[in-house]
Image (tube, rainbow, N blue to C red):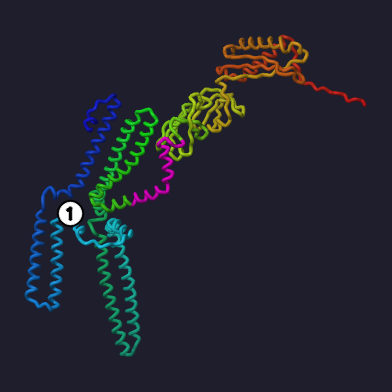
Protein backbone atom coordinates (compact mmCIF):
# COMPACT_ATOMS: atom_id res chain seq x y z
CA UNK A 1 0.00 0.00 0.00
CA UNK A 2 2.80 2.45 0.90
CA UNK A 3 4.57 1.52 -2.34
CA UNK A 4 1.41 2.42 -4.22
CA UNK A 5 1.16 5.80 -2.45
CA UNK A 6 4.77 6.81 -2.90
CA UNK A 7 5.52 5.39 -6.35
CA UNK A 8 2.37 5.85 -8.42
CA UNK A 9 2.78 8.25 -11.33
CA UNK A 10 0.55 11.30 -11.24
CA UNK A 11 -1.88 12.02 -14.02
CA UNK A 12 -1.43 15.83 -13.93
CA UNK A 13 0.83 18.49 -12.35
CA UNK A 14 -1.96 19.47 -9.94
CA UNK A 15 -2.42 15.84 -8.94
CA UNK A 16 1.33 15.49 -8.41
CA UNK A 17 1.38 18.56 -6.18
CA UNK A 18 -1.56 17.31 -4.10
CA UNK A 19 0.00 13.86 -3.69
CA UNK A 20 3.34 15.39 -2.67
CA UNK A 21 1.62 17.46 0.02
CA UNK A 22 -0.29 14.42 1.25
CA UNK A 23 2.88 12.32 1.41
CA UNK A 24 4.76 15.09 3.23
CA UNK A 25 2.10 15.39 5.95
CA UNK A 26 1.90 11.61 6.27
CA UNK A 27 5.65 11.36 6.89
CA UNK A 28 5.52 14.33 9.29
CA UNK A 29 2.74 12.73 11.31
CA UNK A 30 4.56 9.40 11.55
CA UNK A 31 7.78 11.11 12.64
CA UNK A 32 5.97 13.17 15.29
CA UNK A 33 4.23 10.05 16.59
CA UNK A 34 7.54 8.24 16.83
CA UNK A 35 9.40 11.00 18.63
CA UNK A 36 6.53 11.91 20.97
CA UNK A 37 6.07 8.39 22.23
CA UNK A 38 9.84 7.84 22.27
CA UNK A 39 10.28 10.87 24.55
CA UNK A 40 7.49 9.77 26.84
CA UNK A 41 8.65 6.15 26.88
CA UNK A 42 12.36 6.69 27.43
CA UNK A 43 12.04 6.73 31.20
CA UNK A 44 9.62 3.80 31.20
CA UNK A 45 11.70 1.48 29.03
CA UNK A 46 15.18 2.49 30.12
CA UNK A 47 15.41 -0.21 32.74
CA UNK A 48 14.20 -2.87 30.32
CA UNK A 49 16.98 -2.10 27.85
CA UNK A 50 19.76 -1.84 30.41
CA UNK A 51 18.86 -4.80 32.69
CA UNK A 52 18.32 -4.67 36.47
CA UNK A 53 20.00 -1.70 38.17
CA UNK A 54 22.49 -2.51 40.98
CA UNK A 55 20.33 -0.82 43.60
CA UNK A 56 17.46 -3.23 42.87
CA UNK A 57 19.75 -6.24 43.38
CA UNK A 58 21.03 -4.71 46.63
CA UNK A 59 17.47 -4.13 47.82
CA UNK A 60 16.52 -7.78 47.13
CA UNK A 61 19.57 -9.06 49.03
CA UNK A 62 18.73 -6.79 51.97
CA UNK A 63 15.10 -8.04 52.11
CA UNK A 64 16.23 -11.69 51.97
CA UNK A 65 18.69 -11.05 54.83
CA UNK A 66 15.92 -9.43 56.91
CA UNK A 67 13.61 -12.39 56.24
CA UNK A 68 16.28 -14.85 57.46
CA UNK A 69 16.94 -12.73 60.51
CA UNK A 70 13.24 -12.52 61.44
CA UNK A 71 12.79 -16.27 61.00
CA UNK A 72 15.76 -16.85 63.31
CA UNK A 73 14.27 -14.55 65.94
CA UNK A 74 10.96 -16.44 65.84
CA UNK A 75 12.88 -19.72 66.30
CA UNK A 76 14.81 -18.30 69.26
CA UNK A 77 11.61 -17.05 70.93
CA UNK A 78 9.94 -20.45 70.54
CA UNK A 79 12.99 -22.19 72.07
CA UNK A 80 13.72 -19.84 75.00
CA UNK A 81 10.27 -18.73 76.29
CA UNK A 82 7.36 -20.54 77.83
CA UNK A 83 4.07 -20.75 75.88
CA UNK A 84 2.19 -18.92 78.64
CA UNK A 85 4.33 -15.77 78.41
CA UNK A 86 2.15 -12.89 77.18
CA UNK A 87 5.16 -10.71 76.33
CA UNK A 88 6.68 -13.47 74.22
CA UNK A 89 3.36 -13.92 72.38
CA UNK A 90 3.11 -10.20 71.56
CA UNK A 91 6.74 -10.06 70.43
CA UNK A 92 6.30 -13.14 68.23
CA UNK A 93 3.16 -11.64 66.65
CA UNK A 94 4.97 -8.39 65.81
CA UNK A 95 7.88 -10.29 64.28
CA UNK A 96 5.47 -12.46 62.24
CA UNK A 97 3.75 -9.34 60.84
CA UNK A 98 7.12 -7.84 59.91
CA UNK A 99 8.13 -11.12 58.28
CA UNK A 100 4.92 -11.25 56.23
CA UNK A 101 5.46 -7.66 55.09
CA UNK A 102 9.05 -8.41 53.95
CA UNK A 103 7.89 -11.51 52.05
CA UNK A 104 5.20 -9.49 50.23
CA UNK A 105 7.80 -6.86 49.31
CA UNK A 106 10.14 -9.51 47.91
CA UNK A 107 7.31 -11.11 45.96
CA UNK A 108 6.24 -7.77 44.45
CA UNK A 109 9.79 -6.92 43.34
CA UNK A 110 10.31 -10.39 41.89
CA UNK A 111 7.03 -10.46 39.90
CA UNK A 112 7.49 -6.95 38.48
CA UNK A 113 4.25 -5.25 37.30
CA UNK A 114 1.98 -8.23 38.05
CA UNK A 115 -1.04 -7.20 40.14
CA UNK A 116 -0.85 -9.55 43.14
CA UNK A 117 -4.28 -8.47 44.34
CA UNK A 118 -5.75 -10.62 41.57
CA UNK A 119 -4.67 -13.75 43.49
CA UNK A 120 -5.95 -12.64 46.89
CA UNK A 121 -9.45 -13.28 48.14
CA UNK A 122 -11.77 -10.57 46.84
CA UNK A 123 -14.38 -9.31 49.27
CA UNK A 124 -17.67 -8.29 47.71
CA UNK A 125 -18.20 -4.55 47.86
CA UNK A 126 -21.27 -2.55 46.88
CA UNK A 127 -20.77 -0.08 44.05
CA UNK A 128 -20.62 3.52 45.24
CA UNK A 129 -20.35 6.07 42.45
CA UNK A 130 -19.18 8.75 44.88
CA UNK A 131 -16.22 6.60 45.95
CA UNK A 132 -15.43 5.82 42.32
CA UNK A 133 -15.45 9.51 41.40
CA UNK A 134 -13.26 10.21 44.40
CA UNK A 135 -10.72 7.65 43.18
CA UNK A 136 -10.76 9.21 39.71
CA UNK A 137 -10.42 12.86 40.72
CA UNK A 138 -8.22 12.38 43.80
CA UNK A 139 -4.93 12.62 41.79
CA UNK A 140 -6.06 15.88 40.21
CA UNK A 141 -7.11 17.34 43.55
CA UNK A 142 -3.80 16.35 45.11
CA UNK A 143 -1.96 18.01 42.21
CA UNK A 144 -3.99 21.18 42.68
CA UNK A 145 -3.25 21.13 46.42
CA UNK A 146 0.42 20.72 45.64
CA UNK A 147 0.38 23.66 43.23
CA UNK A 148 -1.37 25.93 45.74
CA UNK A 149 0.50 24.64 48.81
CA UNK A 150 2.84 27.64 49.22
CA UNK A 151 0.20 30.45 49.02
CA UNK A 152 -2.14 28.48 51.28
CA UNK A 153 0.67 27.98 53.82
CA UNK A 154 1.50 31.69 53.75
CA UNK A 155 -2.16 32.59 54.31
CA UNK A 156 -2.44 30.09 57.18
CA UNK A 157 0.69 31.46 58.90
CA UNK A 158 -0.54 35.02 58.55
CA UNK A 159 -3.88 34.13 60.08
CA UNK A 160 -2.10 32.29 62.90
CA UNK A 161 0.19 35.28 63.51
CA UNK A 162 -2.82 37.63 63.71
CA UNK A 163 -4.53 35.32 66.20
CA UNK A 164 -1.39 35.13 68.40
CA UNK A 165 -1.07 38.92 68.34
CA UNK A 166 -4.68 39.24 69.42
CA UNK A 167 -4.09 36.84 72.34
CA UNK A 168 -0.83 38.65 73.25
CA UNK A 169 -2.66 41.97 73.45
CA UNK A 170 -5.28 40.37 75.66
CA UNK A 171 -2.56 38.81 77.88
CA UNK A 172 -0.69 42.13 78.18
CA UNK A 173 -3.90 43.86 79.17
CA UNK A 174 -4.62 41.15 81.77
CA UNK A 175 -1.13 41.48 83.31
CA UNK A 176 -1.52 45.25 83.52
CA UNK A 177 -4.95 45.02 85.16
CA UNK A 178 -3.74 42.43 87.67
CA UNK A 179 -0.69 44.58 88.54
CA UNK A 180 -2.83 47.68 89.09
CA UNK A 181 -5.25 45.73 91.25
CA UNK A 182 -2.41 44.19 93.28
CA UNK A 183 -0.94 47.66 93.96
CA UNK A 184 -4.28 48.88 95.35
CA UNK A 185 -4.90 45.88 97.59
CA UNK A 186 -3.38 46.06 101.11
CA UNK A 187 -4.30 42.56 102.25
CA UNK A 188 -1.24 40.29 102.10
CA UNK A 189 -3.37 37.21 101.59
CA UNK A 190 -5.14 38.68 98.58
CA UNK A 191 -1.87 40.17 97.30
CA UNK A 192 -0.22 36.75 97.48
CA UNK A 193 -3.03 35.19 95.51
CA UNK A 194 -2.85 37.98 92.91
CA UNK A 195 0.94 37.50 92.63
CA UNK A 196 0.43 33.85 91.64
CA UNK A 197 -2.19 34.89 89.09
CA UNK A 198 0.18 37.57 87.77
CA UNK A 199 3.00 35.05 87.26
CA UNK A 200 0.58 32.72 85.46
CA UNK A 201 -0.42 35.43 82.98
CA UNK A 202 3.18 36.55 82.54
CA UNK A 203 4.17 32.97 81.68
CA UNK A 204 1.28 32.85 79.22
CA UNK A 205 2.50 36.13 77.71
CA UNK A 206 6.05 34.77 77.30
CA UNK A 207 4.70 31.59 75.68
CA UNK A 208 2.73 33.65 73.18
CA UNK A 209 5.87 35.65 72.37
CA UNK A 210 7.74 32.44 71.65
CA UNK A 211 4.92 31.19 69.46
CA UNK A 212 4.83 34.51 67.58
CA UNK A 213 8.60 34.35 67.00
CA UNK A 214 8.28 30.82 65.61
CA UNK A 215 5.36 31.77 63.31
CA UNK A 216 7.22 34.88 62.08
CA UNK A 217 10.26 32.76 61.34
CA UNK A 218 8.20 30.19 59.39
CA UNK A 219 6.37 32.93 57.51
CA UNK A 220 9.59 34.71 56.52
CA UNK A 221 11.18 31.44 55.48
CA UNK A 222 8.18 30.55 53.31
CA UNK A 223 8.05 34.00 51.71
CA UNK A 224 11.80 34.16 51.15
CA UNK A 225 11.96 30.61 49.82
CA UNK A 226 14.14 30.67 46.71
CA UNK A 227 16.56 33.33 45.54
CA UNK A 228 13.98 35.96 44.71
CA UNK A 229 10.44 36.46 43.51
CA UNK A 230 11.54 36.65 39.88
CA UNK A 231 13.69 33.57 40.17
CA UNK A 232 10.74 31.76 41.76
CA UNK A 233 8.52 32.66 38.82
CA UNK A 234 11.27 31.67 36.39
CA UNK A 235 11.71 28.39 38.20
CA UNK A 236 7.97 27.80 38.12
CA UNK A 237 7.88 28.45 34.37
CA UNK A 238 10.88 26.19 33.88
CA UNK A 239 9.27 23.41 35.87
CA UNK A 240 6.05 23.83 33.91
CA UNK A 241 7.66 23.73 30.47
CA UNK A 242 9.91 20.81 31.36
CA UNK A 243 7.16 18.86 33.09
CA UNK A 244 3.44 19.34 32.71
CA UNK A 245 3.84 21.96 30.00
CA UNK A 246 5.90 19.56 27.88
CA UNK A 247 3.25 16.87 28.32
CA UNK A 248 0.54 19.31 27.30
CA UNK A 249 2.55 20.44 24.26
CA UNK A 250 3.08 16.85 23.13
CA UNK A 251 -0.63 16.13 23.60
CA UNK A 252 -1.55 19.17 21.49
CA UNK A 253 0.92 18.15 18.76
CA UNK A 254 -0.45 14.61 18.68
CA UNK A 255 -4.03 15.96 18.54
CA UNK A 256 -3.17 18.30 15.66
CA UNK A 257 -1.29 15.64 13.73
CA UNK A 258 -3.98 12.99 14.09
CA UNK A 259 -6.64 15.53 13.17
CA UNK A 260 -4.71 16.71 10.11
CA UNK A 261 -3.86 13.20 8.95
CA UNK A 262 -7.47 12.03 9.16
CA UNK A 263 -8.73 15.18 7.44
CA UNK A 264 -6.33 14.63 4.54
CA UNK A 265 -7.32 10.98 4.40
CA UNK A 266 -10.98 11.96 4.43
CA UNK A 267 -10.51 14.31 1.48
CA UNK A 268 -8.64 11.72 -0.55
CA UNK A 269 -11.23 9.05 0.19
CA UNK A 270 -14.11 11.43 -0.55
CA UNK A 271 -12.61 12.31 -3.92
CA UNK A 272 -12.14 8.63 -4.70
CA UNK A 273 -15.74 7.75 -3.84
CA UNK A 274 -17.36 10.81 -5.44
CA UNK A 275 -15.87 10.11 -8.87
CA UNK A 276 -19.16 8.50 -9.83
CA UNK A 277 -21.90 10.82 -11.01
CA UNK A 278 -24.74 8.72 -9.60
CA UNK A 279 -26.82 9.78 -6.67
CA UNK A 280 -25.77 6.74 -4.66
CA UNK A 281 -22.09 7.59 -5.14
CA UNK A 282 -22.64 11.15 -3.96
CA UNK A 283 -24.60 9.93 -0.92
CA UNK A 284 -21.85 7.44 -0.05
CA UNK A 285 -19.26 10.20 -0.31
CA UNK A 286 -21.25 12.42 2.05
CA UNK A 287 -21.81 9.58 4.52
CA UNK A 288 -18.08 8.81 4.46
CA UNK A 289 -17.33 12.49 5.02
CA UNK A 290 -19.57 12.70 8.11
CA UNK A 291 -18.23 9.45 9.58
CA UNK A 292 -14.68 10.69 9.09
CA UNK A 293 -15.54 14.04 10.68
CA UNK A 294 -16.78 12.31 13.85
CA UNK A 295 -13.97 9.74 13.84
CA UNK A 296 -11.40 12.50 13.33
CA UNK A 297 -12.46 14.30 16.50
CA UNK A 298 -12.73 11.12 18.57
CA UNK A 299 -9.39 9.67 17.48
CA UNK A 300 -7.65 13.03 17.85
CA UNK A 301 -8.91 13.34 21.44
CA UNK A 302 -7.86 9.75 22.20
CA UNK A 303 -4.47 10.46 20.63
CA UNK A 304 -4.06 13.51 22.87
CA UNK A 305 -4.93 11.47 25.97
CA UNK A 306 -2.39 8.69 25.25
CA UNK A 307 0.78 10.77 25.89
CA UNK A 308 -0.77 12.20 29.07
CA UNK A 309 -1.52 8.66 30.27
CA UNK A 310 1.99 7.45 29.47
CA UNK A 311 3.54 10.46 31.25
CA UNK A 312 1.26 9.93 34.28
CA UNK A 313 0.04 13.54 34.17
CA UNK A 314 -3.26 12.91 35.93
CA UNK A 315 -4.05 16.58 36.48
CA UNK A 316 -4.21 17.52 32.79
CA UNK A 317 -5.79 14.19 31.93
CA UNK A 318 -8.52 14.65 34.54
CA UNK A 319 -9.22 18.20 33.37
CA UNK A 320 -9.52 16.90 29.80
CA UNK A 321 -11.93 14.18 30.94
CA UNK A 322 -14.04 16.76 32.81
CA UNK A 323 -14.24 18.89 29.66
CA UNK A 324 -15.27 15.87 27.59
CA UNK A 325 -17.94 14.86 30.11
CA UNK A 326 -19.32 18.40 30.10
CA UNK A 327 -19.34 18.40 26.31
CA UNK A 328 -21.28 15.11 26.25
CA UNK A 329 -23.89 16.46 28.68
CA UNK A 330 -24.26 19.62 26.58
CA UNK A 331 -24.54 17.52 23.42
CA UNK A 332 -27.41 15.51 24.92
CA UNK A 333 -29.78 18.50 24.87
CA UNK A 334 -28.87 19.63 21.35
CA UNK A 335 -28.79 16.16 19.77
CA UNK A 336 -32.12 16.56 17.85
CA UNK A 337 -30.82 19.70 16.18
CA UNK A 338 -27.61 17.94 15.24
CA UNK A 339 -29.59 15.09 13.70
CA UNK A 340 -31.36 17.59 11.44
CA UNK A 341 -27.98 18.98 10.45
CA UNK A 342 -26.70 15.47 9.71
CA UNK A 343 -29.64 14.94 7.35
CA UNK A 344 -28.72 18.18 5.61
CA UNK A 345 -25.09 17.08 5.29
CA UNK A 346 -26.22 13.76 3.81
CA UNK A 347 -28.26 15.71 1.23
CA UNK A 348 -31.50 14.07 2.33
CA UNK A 349 -32.96 17.06 4.21
CA UNK A 350 -35.34 19.82 3.12
CA UNK A 351 -32.50 21.61 1.31
CA UNK A 352 -30.47 19.74 -1.31
CA UNK A 353 -27.57 20.55 -3.58
CA UNK A 354 -28.33 21.74 -7.11
CA UNK A 355 -31.83 22.93 -6.23
CA UNK A 356 -33.39 26.37 -6.00
CA UNK A 357 -34.05 28.03 -2.66
CA UNK A 358 -35.44 31.46 -1.72
CA UNK A 359 -33.41 33.26 0.94
CA UNK A 360 -34.55 36.72 2.08
CA UNK A 361 -36.80 37.07 -0.93
CA UNK A 362 -34.06 36.31 -3.48
CA UNK A 363 -33.73 33.01 -5.39
CA UNK A 364 -30.44 31.12 -4.97
CA UNK A 365 -28.84 27.97 -6.30
CA UNK A 366 -27.59 25.60 -3.57
CA UNK A 367 -24.01 25.04 -4.72
CA UNK A 368 -22.64 23.04 -1.75
CA UNK A 369 -23.96 21.83 1.59
CA UNK A 370 -21.42 21.65 4.39
CA UNK A 371 -20.85 23.05 7.86
CA UNK A 372 -20.92 26.40 6.05
CA UNK A 373 -23.01 25.91 2.92
CA UNK A 374 -22.59 27.92 -0.28
CA UNK A 375 -25.51 29.41 -2.25
CA UNK A 376 -25.00 31.23 -5.54
CA UNK A 377 -26.99 33.70 -7.65
CA UNK A 378 -25.17 34.28 -10.97
CA UNK A 379 -27.25 37.38 -11.76
CA UNK A 380 -25.99 39.39 -8.77
CA UNK A 381 -22.64 41.03 -8.20
CA UNK A 382 -21.04 39.21 -5.28
CA UNK A 383 -23.82 36.66 -5.51
CA UNK A 384 -22.15 33.98 -3.38
CA UNK A 385 -23.10 33.54 0.28
CA UNK A 386 -21.88 31.21 3.04
CA UNK A 387 -24.66 30.16 5.39
CA UNK A 388 -24.34 28.20 8.65
CA UNK A 389 -26.32 25.04 9.21
CA UNK A 390 -28.78 26.87 11.47
CA UNK A 391 -29.82 29.12 8.56
CA UNK A 392 -29.98 26.29 6.04
CA UNK A 393 -32.22 24.27 8.34
CA UNK A 394 -34.96 26.93 8.05
CA UNK A 395 -35.11 26.79 4.24
CA UNK A 396 -36.79 24.48 1.71
CA UNK A 397 -35.42 23.93 -1.78
CA UNK A 398 -37.03 22.68 -5.00
CA UNK A 399 -35.98 21.55 -8.44
CA UNK A 400 -36.03 24.28 -11.07
CA UNK A 401 -36.37 24.61 -14.82
CA UNK A 402 -33.30 25.66 -16.76
CA UNK A 403 -35.25 28.57 -18.30
CA UNK A 404 -36.14 30.12 -14.94
CA UNK A 405 -34.35 33.47 -14.46
CA UNK A 406 -32.32 33.96 -11.28
CA UNK A 407 -33.27 37.65 -11.15
CA UNK A 408 -35.77 39.75 -13.11
CA UNK A 409 -33.12 42.24 -14.24
CA UNK A 410 -29.42 42.59 -14.93
CA UNK A 411 -27.00 45.49 -15.08
CA UNK A 412 -27.87 48.16 -17.74
CA UNK A 413 -31.48 47.00 -17.96
CA UNK A 414 -34.18 49.70 -18.08
CA UNK A 415 -37.05 49.18 -15.64
CA UNK A 416 -40.26 50.78 -14.41
CA UNK A 417 -41.40 50.07 -10.87
CA UNK A 418 -44.91 50.07 -9.40
CA UNK A 419 -44.37 53.58 -8.03
CA UNK A 420 -43.56 54.75 -11.63
CA UNK A 421 -39.84 54.99 -10.89
CA UNK A 422 -38.05 54.84 -14.25
CA UNK A 423 -34.35 54.15 -14.50
CA UNK A 424 -31.40 52.01 -15.56
CA UNK A 425 -29.92 49.34 -13.32
CA UNK A 426 -26.30 50.27 -12.54
CA UNK A 427 -25.64 47.79 -9.70
CA UNK A 428 -27.45 44.81 -8.21
CA UNK A 429 -26.06 42.86 -5.25
CA UNK A 430 -27.62 40.57 -2.63
CA UNK A 431 -28.20 43.65 -0.43
CA UNK A 432 -28.97 46.68 -2.68
CA UNK A 433 -30.13 47.67 -6.16
CA UNK A 434 -29.01 51.01 -7.64
CA UNK A 435 -31.07 52.70 -10.39
CA UNK A 436 -29.96 55.73 -12.40
CA UNK A 437 -33.17 57.70 -12.85
CA UNK A 438 -34.03 60.52 -15.27
CA UNK A 439 -31.68 63.43 -14.63
CA UNK A 440 -28.76 61.18 -13.68
CA UNK A 441 -29.41 60.72 -9.95
CA UNK A 442 -28.99 57.24 -8.44
CA UNK A 443 -31.78 55.77 -6.36
CA UNK A 444 -31.01 52.86 -3.99
CA UNK A 445 -33.38 50.07 -2.96
CA UNK A 446 -32.94 47.10 -0.71
CA UNK A 447 -33.07 43.99 -2.86
CA UNK A 448 -36.16 42.56 -1.17
CA UNK A 449 -37.99 45.92 -1.46
CA UNK A 450 -36.97 46.19 -5.12
CA UNK A 451 -38.50 42.80 -5.89
CA UNK A 452 -41.68 43.65 -3.97
CA UNK A 453 -42.23 46.64 -6.33
CA UNK A 454 -42.49 44.23 -9.30
CA UNK A 455 -40.04 45.83 -11.73
CA UNK A 456 -41.05 45.79 -15.42
CA UNK A 457 -37.96 45.10 -17.52
CA UNK A 458 -38.19 47.19 -20.70
CA UNK A 459 -34.86 45.96 -22.02
CA UNK A 460 -36.46 42.67 -23.08
CA UNK A 461 -38.98 44.55 -25.25
CA UNK A 462 -42.00 46.70 -24.48
CA UNK A 463 -45.24 48.04 -25.96
CA UNK A 464 -46.89 51.47 -26.05
CA UNK A 465 -50.69 51.65 -26.10
CA UNK A 466 -52.12 55.04 -27.11
CA UNK A 467 -55.82 55.91 -27.33
CA UNK A 468 -56.73 58.71 -29.79
CA UNK A 469 -60.26 60.11 -30.48
CA UNK A 470 -61.82 61.61 -33.67
CA UNK A 471 -65.04 63.50 -34.17
CA UNK A 472 -68.29 61.70 -35.03
CA UNK A 473 -68.34 63.39 -38.43
CA UNK A 474 -65.76 60.78 -39.53
CA UNK A 475 -68.05 57.94 -38.54
CA UNK A 476 -68.37 56.60 -42.11
CA UNK A 477 -64.66 56.05 -42.58
CA UNK A 478 -63.45 55.47 -39.03
CA UNK A 479 -63.18 51.67 -39.41
CA UNK A 480 -61.60 51.67 -42.88
CA UNK A 481 -59.58 54.41 -44.55
CA UNK A 482 -58.83 56.29 -41.32
CA UNK A 483 -57.12 53.26 -39.78
CA UNK A 484 -55.10 52.55 -42.92
CA UNK A 485 -53.94 56.13 -43.37
CA UNK A 486 -53.08 56.48 -39.68
CA UNK A 487 -51.02 53.26 -39.66
CA UNK A 488 -49.06 54.35 -42.73
CA UNK A 489 -48.46 57.78 -41.24
CA UNK A 490 -47.17 56.31 -37.92
CA UNK A 491 -44.87 53.88 -39.76
CA UNK A 492 -43.46 56.71 -41.89
CA UNK A 493 -43.06 59.01 -38.89
CA UNK A 494 -41.14 56.38 -36.89
CA UNK A 495 -38.95 55.65 -39.90
CA UNK A 496 -38.11 59.33 -40.30
CA UNK A 497 -37.27 59.50 -36.58
CA UNK A 498 -34.88 56.55 -36.92
CA UNK A 499 -36.96 53.92 -35.08
CA UNK A 500 -37.78 51.65 -38.03
CA UNK A 501 -35.35 48.91 -36.90
CA UNK A 502 -36.57 49.06 -33.31
CA UNK A 503 -40.27 48.74 -34.29
CA UNK A 504 -41.27 45.09 -33.99
CA UNK A 505 -45.00 45.38 -34.61
CA UNK A 506 -47.61 48.10 -35.14
CA UNK A 507 -51.38 47.74 -34.96
CA UNK A 508 -54.04 50.48 -35.35
CA UNK A 509 -57.54 49.38 -34.37
CA UNK A 510 -60.91 50.94 -33.65
CA UNK A 511 -61.49 50.73 -29.93
CA UNK A 512 -64.92 52.16 -29.09
CA UNK A 513 -67.58 54.78 -29.73
CA UNK A 514 -67.26 57.00 -26.72
CA UNK A 515 -69.64 59.70 -25.58
CA UNK A 516 -67.86 62.54 -27.37
CA UNK A 517 -65.49 60.77 -29.78
CA UNK A 518 -64.71 57.71 -31.82
CA UNK A 519 -61.63 56.19 -30.12
CA UNK A 520 -58.75 54.55 -31.99
CA UNK A 521 -56.22 52.27 -30.21
CA UNK A 522 -52.58 52.35 -31.38
CA UNK A 523 -50.43 49.37 -30.25
CA UNK A 524 -46.72 49.83 -30.99
CA UNK A 525 -44.21 47.15 -29.92
CA UNK A 526 -40.48 47.97 -29.74
CA UNK A 527 -37.29 46.05 -29.02
CA UNK A 528 -35.33 46.62 -25.84
CA UNK A 529 -32.66 48.62 -27.66
CA UNK A 530 -34.77 51.80 -27.31
CA UNK A 531 -36.03 51.10 -23.78
CA UNK A 532 -34.32 54.22 -22.45
CA UNK A 533 -36.54 56.32 -24.85
CA UNK A 534 -39.78 54.88 -23.53
CA UNK A 535 -41.42 58.25 -22.75
CA UNK A 536 -39.96 59.94 -25.86
CA UNK A 537 -41.59 57.32 -28.08
CA UNK A 538 -44.94 57.80 -26.33
CA UNK A 539 -44.80 61.54 -27.04
CA UNK A 540 -43.64 60.91 -30.62
CA UNK A 541 -46.69 58.72 -31.32
CA UNK A 542 -48.99 61.46 -30.05
CA UNK A 543 -47.28 64.03 -32.25
CA UNK A 544 -47.49 61.85 -35.38
CA UNK A 545 -51.22 61.28 -34.87
CA UNK A 546 -51.90 65.01 -34.40
CA UNK A 547 -49.91 65.83 -37.56
CA UNK A 548 -51.88 63.22 -39.50
CA UNK A 549 -55.16 64.72 -38.36
CA UNK A 550 -54.03 68.12 -39.56
CA UNK A 551 -52.94 66.74 -42.91
CA UNK A 552 -56.19 64.80 -43.45
CA UNK A 553 -58.48 67.50 -41.99
CA UNK A 554 -59.66 65.15 -39.27
CA UNK A 555 -61.37 66.89 -36.40
CA UNK A 556 -60.22 66.08 -32.88
CA UNK A 557 -63.20 66.46 -30.56
CA UNK A 558 -63.31 67.79 -27.06
CA UNK A 559 -65.52 66.79 -24.20
CA UNK A 560 -69.04 68.18 -24.58
CA UNK A 561 -71.85 68.69 -22.11
CA UNK A 562 -75.35 68.08 -23.47
CA UNK A 563 -78.15 70.00 -21.71
CA UNK A 564 -81.70 68.66 -22.06
CA UNK A 565 -84.61 71.03 -21.38
CA UNK A 566 -87.29 69.65 -19.15
CA UNK A 567 -90.80 69.23 -20.54
CA UNK A 568 -93.02 72.27 -19.87
CA UNK A 569 -95.71 70.06 -18.43
> Is residue 447 rendered magenta in the image?
no
> What residue sits 70% from the left and 18% below the top?
511
Q: Quadrant of residue 19?
A: top left
Taking 66 as reference, is 132 left or right?
A: right
554 vs 150: above or below: above
Q: Is residue 348 a member of the stretch shown in magenta? A: yes
Quadrant of the rendered image containing residue 207: bottom left
Query: Could you tell me what secondary structure mostly forms the magenta stretch?
Result: helix
Asked whether 101 or 281 is in front, the reply is 281
Residue 144, visible in the rendered structure: no
Q: Which residues are magenta?
A: 322-350
Residue lying at 24% horizontally and 37% vertically, measured from the top left:
28
Q: Taking 551 as reference, is 381 left or right?
A: left
Q: Position of residue 213 (x, y in %)?
A: 26, 69
Q: Position of residue 322 (x, y in %)?
A: 33, 52
Q: Is residue 495 visible?
A: yes
567, 166: nearer the viewer: 567
From the viewer's perspective, is 184 left or right of 336?
Answer: left
Q: Residue 566 appears at what percent x and percent y?
A: 88, 25
Q: Residue at x 24, y 25 (%)?
A: 9
Residue at the spot of label 1? 113
Quarter in which the N terminus is drawn: top left
The location of residue 84, given as percent across then percent down, is 12, 79
Decide if residue 125 is on the left or right side of residue 458. Answer: left
In the foreground, 439 or 255 = 255
Amino acid sequence: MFKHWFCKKPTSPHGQQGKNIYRFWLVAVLVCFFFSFTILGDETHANESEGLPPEVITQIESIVAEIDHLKQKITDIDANTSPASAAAEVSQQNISEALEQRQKSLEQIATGTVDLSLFSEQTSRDFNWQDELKDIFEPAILELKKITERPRKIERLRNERDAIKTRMNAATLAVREITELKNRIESKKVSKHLSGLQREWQDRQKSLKRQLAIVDFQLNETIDQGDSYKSGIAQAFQNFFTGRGLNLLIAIIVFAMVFLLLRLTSRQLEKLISRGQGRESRFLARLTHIIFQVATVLLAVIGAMIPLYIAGDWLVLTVLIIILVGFVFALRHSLPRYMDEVRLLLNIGPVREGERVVYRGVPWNVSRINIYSTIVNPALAGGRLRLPMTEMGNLVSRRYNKDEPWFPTKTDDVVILDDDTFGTVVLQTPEVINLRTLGGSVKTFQTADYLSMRPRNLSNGFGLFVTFGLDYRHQSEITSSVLTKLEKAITKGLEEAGYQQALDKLKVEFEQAAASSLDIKVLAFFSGEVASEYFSLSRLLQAIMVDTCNAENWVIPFNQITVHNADSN
